[in-house]
Image (cartoon, grey):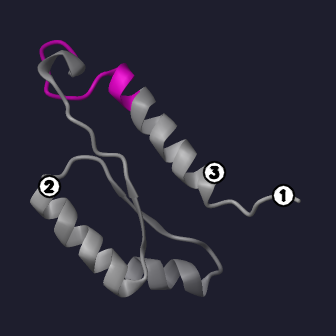
Amino acid sequence: MEMAATARSYGAGFSYLMLFLSDDDAWTRREFARKNGVDLIDCREPIYPEDNVPGESHPNAGVHARWGDCIAAAMASRLPQRQ
């Protein structure tokens, strides 16, 4: 909440982004965000073994592309609509 308040004090927006969280943790953070007026972007999705870089547990380029699309869509939906 302090980061959101600091961002607002400088005239900037603030969004909390969820990528890797269990459903229980996501629910807890969603409730916290709702109660504290913090914008939340939920881009969680299942990550399967084939979604990792071979030999690592790091998500591959395809996962990053999907996350990027999710974040871009969320941010676009927050822009003022042109008349």
Magenta segment boundaries in residue numbering: 53-64
The answer to whether 79 appears left or right of 45 in the picture is right
In space, the residues marked 2 and 1 are separated at their CA atoms by 36 Å
Q: Which mark is residue 23?
A: 2
Which of pointers 3 and 1 lies earlier in the amino acid sequence?
Answer: 3
Residue indicated by mark 1 = 82
CB within 8 Å, label 2 to label 3: no
In terms of image quadrants, where is residue 38?
Answer: bottom left
Q: Which mark is residue 76?
A: 3
Three-letter code for the amino acid on which mark 2 is drawn: Asp
In space, the residues marked 2 and 3 are separated at their CA atoms by 25 Å
Q: Would you place residue 35 above or below residue 28 in this image? A: below
Give the residue displayed 55% in from the left and 45% down from the top: 73
Which of pointers 2 and 3 lies earlier in the amino acid sequence?
Answer: 2
Neighbour tally class for label 1: few under 14, some 14-19, many 20 plus, Cα within 10 Å: few
Q: Nearer the viewer, mark 3 or mark 1?
A: 1
